[in-house]
Image: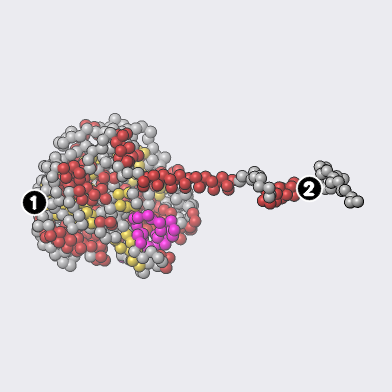
């Protein structure tokens, strides 16, 4: 008889027994984790969340959202952004090209663009081992990717030889050619692109447009010595004139390109070997008009600050926000020291030092812009001289704009009779410097010594005349190189044979305009933006700093009418070039028949009052007066296009003035 086995009911295990050990906390966690990964009944067990998981999810969500928005942007109709903008701001005006096409205007005169400093692209043709893989890649302009990937290598290849101002051994960096050389400075940041696009609307194309690109780091004469850039410009203008039915060219230089073309006009007519051998009537035969945009005819004080302490207003403010960051040896980069060492090899920077000395820029107790207010209120437009000064009368304490550099706010404001200067020119230089680690990035401050540095501060205040001597003292090698190519004075006798030397050709106060009475010259520039004019400095003896002079950012006035902000005295201009520099030559020195303009070339001053964009959808705005953004100003573009299609100064309304340029020009006692 089979035995019947009865199955015992499952007994619930007890929690503990005397013979069992209670597991410790670590073993419990391990047991829990193993059960989480080996569970076979399909159940879901909650997993512990970590900070790393949160970060990954956050980054993933941002990327997905970005890709989705990018997809929508590319999928939407091209007119959608304009539709949204018009829904907010109202109907947008037609671009100048569309407007003039409706009026029936068509391409007529060939147009030549001349870019300024830094806006033209530069590419590598030969380099050191650290630059492998960069052949014909842009080192300047474009994405600037190499700045972040290999910064010290980039600085080495962007620098020129400190003795010759030409290529260092084993390095060749050259200007990008064609319209793409300066249509965009970086992706999405236009320079010439808007003007080119509008000209294309009325029939312009590459056969009648030419970008006269050049290596903007070189002195003007050296662009010919090394690259024959001036000869190429001459040949291209001659070709465009001959292939366009003999119609003369309209030249459109921007910023430093204005000085470069001044040099060209003397070079092209001068006999070989220093000149182009075009003869005394070359400009009269080939040029209809020169439409200068934001031209620093008489230089910019900003160039002084850049060469003296490798800073301007923005850099000084950044240093104040993060003390020591730009001066310290961070990752062995020594940011400002590398910038100073590099830019001091660029001879072009010396072309923009103030010209005309105290006669133009003012002295210890006077300046042409005396009484200007920086309240930022819009001024009424006026078409005739004499009216603009009404809105430039300040009720605040006067500003001594003639003191381009002052050591201390008290010195900047003190009466001239109370300033006791100790002449720095005879001070003995030494080899001792506060920070010996700065030897890694050599600048000429290393050769001054503590005595020489203190002598600079004890002179206390520098006008335009003294600034040139100051730079000769602190950077003699740089200025010796620059003095061979540029001059900053005023000619007593323009017929003196010495002014036939190329060093004088880019200074409008030391050279004559060509004999071309039918040619026109325009000064087109923005106004209504505070622009650097003078600086308050301090002596910095910090052991962490290799540059002994800094802008004193604590020198500040809260009064909205005050022109002193963060150690910088501002005046009217386009944020880079003061009105005085951009407008004086066309407003006075070249107006009518003068010794600087013997053939009586007609000159016009066209100012564009700055109006910032109303919202982000407007980008950089179509009414901007800023130094680069003005290249997208519809009014300026229309003026250029009307002249290029056959118009002249009277067709676009003669002078258009919003500042006190005529009044300020009258205060300058210059022999005409």
Q: In the image, residue 381 lies at what x, y percent?
A: 20, 34
Q: Earlier in the sequence, mark 2 or mark 1?
A: 2
> Of the residues tagged 2 and 1, which is closer to the observer?
2
User: Which stretch appears magenta?
Assistant: 137-164
In the image, residue 529 lies at what x, y percent?
29, 39
Residue matched to label 2? 23
Residue furthest right in the image = 1
Q: Which mark is residue 517?
A: 1
Q: Residue 244 vs residue 8: left or right?
A: left
> Under tag 1, what secondary structure?
loop
> How would you rate the neighbour count of disc 2 (Cα within 10 Å): few for under 14, some for 14-19, many for 20 or more?
few
Residue 162 is inside the magenta segment: yes
User: Which of the two residues, 160 or 476, is positioned nearer the viewer here?
Assistant: 160
In front of the other: 68 or 514: 68
| Residue 333 horizontal/vertical position (percent) | 46, 56
Q: Position of residue 531 (x, y in %)?
A: 30, 42
Q: Is residue 637 magenta?
A: no
Q: CA gap, disc 2 to disc 1?
A: 104 Å
Depicted 370 relative to depicted 421: above or below: above
């Amino acid at each position: 008889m089979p035995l019947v086995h009865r199955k015992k009911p499952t007994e619930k295990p007890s929690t503990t027994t005397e013979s069992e050990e209670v597991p410790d906390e670590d073993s419990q966690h391990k047991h829990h984790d193993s059960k989480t990964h080996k569970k076979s009944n399909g159940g879901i067990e909650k997993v512990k969340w970590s900070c790393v998981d949160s970060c990954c999810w956050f980054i993933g969500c941002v990327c997905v959202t970005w890709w989705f928005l990018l997809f929508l942007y590319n999928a939407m109709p091209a007119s959608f952004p304009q539709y949204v903008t018009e829904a907010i701001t109202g109907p947008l005006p037609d671009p100048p090209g569309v407007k003039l096409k409706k009026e029936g205007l068509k391409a007529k005169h060939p147009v030549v663009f001349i870019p300024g400093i830094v806006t033209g692209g530069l590419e590598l043709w030969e380099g050191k081992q650290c630059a492998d893989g960069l052949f014909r890649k842009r080192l300047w302009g474009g994405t600037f990717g190499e700045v972040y990937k290999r910064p010290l290598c980039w600085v080495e290849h962007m620098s020129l030889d400190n003795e010759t101002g030409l290529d260092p051994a084993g390095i060749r960096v050259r200007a990008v050619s064609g319209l793409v050389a300066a249509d965009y400075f970086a992706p999405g940041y236009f320079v010439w692109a808007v003007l080119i696009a509008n000209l294309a609307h009325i029939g312009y194309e590459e056969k009648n447009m030419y970008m006269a690109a050049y290596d903007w780091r070189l002195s003007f004469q050296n662009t010919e010595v090394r690259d024959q850039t001036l000869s190429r410009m001459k040949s291209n203008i001659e070709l465009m004139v001959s292939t366009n039915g003999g119609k003369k060219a309209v030249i459109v230089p921007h910023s430093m390109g204005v000085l470069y073309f001044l040099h060209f006009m003397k070079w092209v007519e001068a006999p070989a070997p220093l000149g182009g051998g075009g003869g005394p009537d070359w400009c009269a035969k080939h040029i209809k008009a020169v439409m200068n945009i934001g031209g620093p005819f008489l230089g910019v004080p900003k160039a002084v600050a850049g060469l003296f302490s490798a800073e301007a207003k923005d850099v000084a403010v950044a240093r104040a926000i993060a003390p020591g960051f730009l001066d310290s040896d961070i990752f062995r980069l020594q940011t400002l020291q590398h910038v100073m060492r590099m830019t001091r090899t660029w001879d072009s920077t010396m072309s923009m030092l103030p010209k005309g000395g105290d006669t133009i820029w003012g002295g210890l107790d006077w300046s042409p812009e005396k009484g200007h207010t920086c309240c930022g209120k819009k001024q009424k437009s006026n078409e005739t001289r004499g009216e603009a000064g009404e809105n430039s009368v300040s009720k605040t304490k006067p500003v001594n704009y003639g003191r381009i550099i002052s050591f201390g706010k008290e010195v900047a404001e003190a009466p001239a009779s109370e300033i006791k200067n100790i002449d720095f020119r005879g001070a003995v230089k030494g080899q001792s410097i506060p920070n010996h680690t700065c030897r890694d990035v050599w600048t000429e401050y290393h050769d001054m010594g503590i005595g020489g540095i203190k002598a600079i501060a004890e002179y206390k205040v520098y006008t335009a005349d003294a600034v040139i001597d100051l730079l000769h003292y602190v950077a003699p090698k740089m200025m010796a190189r620059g003095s061979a190519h540029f001059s900053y004075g005023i000619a007593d006798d323009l017929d003196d044979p010495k002014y036939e030397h190329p060093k004088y050709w880019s200074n409008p106060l030391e050279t004559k305009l060509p004999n071309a009475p039918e040619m026109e010259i325009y000064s087109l520039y923005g106004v209504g933006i505070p622009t650097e004019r003078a600086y308050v400095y301090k002596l910095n003896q910090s052991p962490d700093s290799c540059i002994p002079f800094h802008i004193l950012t604590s020198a500040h006035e809260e009064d909205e009418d005050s022109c002193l902000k963060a150690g910088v005295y501002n005046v009217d201009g386009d944020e880079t070039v003061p009105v005085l520099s951009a407008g004086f030559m066309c407003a006075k020195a070249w107006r009518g028949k003068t010794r600087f303009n013997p053939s009586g070339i007609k000159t016009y001053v066209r100012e564009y009052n700055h109006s910032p964009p109303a919202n982000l959808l407007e980008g950089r705005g179509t009414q901007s007066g800023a130094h680069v953004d003005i290249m997208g100003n519809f009014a300026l573009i229309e003026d250029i296009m009307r002249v290029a299609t056959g118009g002249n100064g009277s067709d676009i309304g003669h002078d258009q003035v919003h500042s006190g340029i005529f009044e300020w020009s009258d205060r300058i006692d210059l022999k005409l």
